[in-house]
Image (spheres, rainbow, N blue to C red):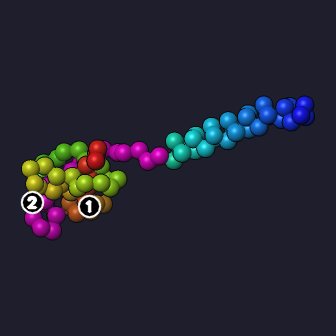
Amino acid sequence: MKRFSKFIPMAVLALGLVGALSSFTVSNNAKKTINIPGFIQVNPLGTQCSTSIMCADDGGPLCTASGVQYWGKNASGNCVVKLYRNHP
């Protein structure tokens, strides 16, 4: 029984370290939401855009205001990238 009681504090310490490391890796891998300017398409192709609000690109409900969908610009400057709300 004495031998067993020596290992209990070590086992508790080991479990604590494993729990701390697992929670640390989860928090480091969490995706951070980035604000992206959202624009209204002036034409269906999205080659002309106007008005800007802040949206995100991380999924969730689409970025809309008053029933109008907002779009992000691609590398060519066209408003064709779907954007989502910052806080779903």
Q: Quadrant of the N terminus?
A: top right
The residue drawn where x is 25% and y is 60% is: 82
Of all residues, the one furthest to the bottom in this rendering is: 45
- Image coordinates of residue 9 in percent, x first then y, are 78, 31
Residue position marked by numbered label 2 in the rendering: 42
From the viewer's perspective, is residue 84 above or below residue 46?
A: above
The residue drawn where x is 20% and y is 60% is: 79
Q: Give the camera-side residue of 4 and 41.
A: 4
The residue drawn where x is 25% and y is 54% is: 61
Q: Give the camera-side residue of 70 and 42.
A: 70
Magenta range is 30-48
Q: Give the camera-side residue of 23 and 31.
A: 23
Check residue 1 in the rendering and tell me which mark sits there, or answer none: none
Question: In this rendering, does residue 49 appear at all?
Answer: no
Check residue 81 in the rendering and tell me which mark sits there, or answer none: 1
3 falls in the magenta region: no
**Lateral position of residue 54 relative to residue 20, left or right:** left
Q: Residues within 10 Å of mark 1 (few under 14, many from 20)?
A: some
Main structural element of the magenta stretch: helix, strand or loop?
loop
Question: Amino acid type of disc 1?
Answer: Val
Which of disc 1 and disc 2 is earlier in sequence?
A: 2
**Lateral position of residue 25 relative to residue 63, left or right:** right
Question: Amino acid type of disc 2?
Answer: Val
Quadrant of the image occupied by residue 10? top right
Query: Which SS class for mark 1?
Result: strand
Question: In this rendering, does residue 51 appear at all?
Answer: yes
- Image coordinates of residue 58 in percent, x first then y, are 35, 53
- Image coordinates of residue 75 in percent, x first then y, are 30, 60
Query: Which SS class for mark 2?
Result: loop
Q: Nearer the viewer, mark 2 or mark 1?
A: 1
47 falls in the magenta region: yes
- Image coordinates of residue 52 in percent, x first then y, are 17, 46
